[in-house]
Image (spheres, rainbow, N blue to C red):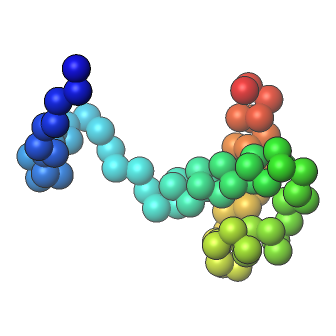
């Protein structure tokens, strides 16, 4: 049976023990996911492909190596 419940506001949700992810970590994760997606579709994962995916040149310069490492580790494990 499906029931509809009111969504709790962010202010009422407990946050003890859970650190907020840094913006850099989320950028690395999003970029790694996009890299895996591009590669699985047979696309070359390069700067132009990441720019077309919506990442800025600054984000690519700062995070592409970490994202590639994460994508490679995730790709092997999955």
Relative to the observer, which residue lies in front, 43 or 1? 1
Relative to the observer, which residue lies in front, 44 or 58? 44
Q: Residue at x 25, y 35 (%)?
A: 17
Relative to the observer, which residue lies in front, 60 or 17? 60
Q: Total label count? A: 0
Percent of width and height locating residue 7: 16, 45
Q: Classify 67 as above or below 78.
A: below
Q: Quadrant of residue 2?
A: top left
Q: Classify 6 as above or below 78.
A: below
Observer able to see residue 66: no
Q: Classify 24 as above or below 76.
A: below
Q: Which residue is drawn at 32% across and 44% down?
A: 19
> Is 25 situated left or right of 62 in this image?
left
Q: Which residue is drawn at 29% across and 38% down?
A: 18
**Which residue, as the protein is rendered here, is positioned at the far top?**
1
Which quadrant of the rendered structure holds the C terminus?
Answer: top right
Percent of width and height locating residue 65: 76, 57
Q: In which quarter of the image is residue 73?
A: top right
Relative to the observer, which residue lies in front, 28 or 9? 9
Which quadrant of the rendered structure holds the N terminus?
Answer: top left
Q: Classify 20 as above or below 73.
A: below
Q: Quadrant of residue 64?
A: bottom right
Percent of width and height locating residue 15: 20, 41
Observer able to see residue 48: yes
Q: Which residue is drawn at 85% across and 66% down?
A: 46
């Amino acid at each position: 049976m499906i029931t509809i419940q009111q969504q709790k506001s962010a202010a009422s949700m407990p946050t003890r023990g859970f650190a907020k992810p840094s913006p850099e970590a989320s950028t690395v994760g999003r970029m790694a996911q996009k890299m895996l997606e591009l590669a699985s579709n047979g696309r070359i994962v390069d700067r132009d492909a990441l720019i077309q995916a919506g990442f800025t040149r600054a984000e690519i310069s700062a995070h592409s190596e970490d994202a590639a490492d994460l994508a490679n580790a995730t790709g092997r494990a999955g």
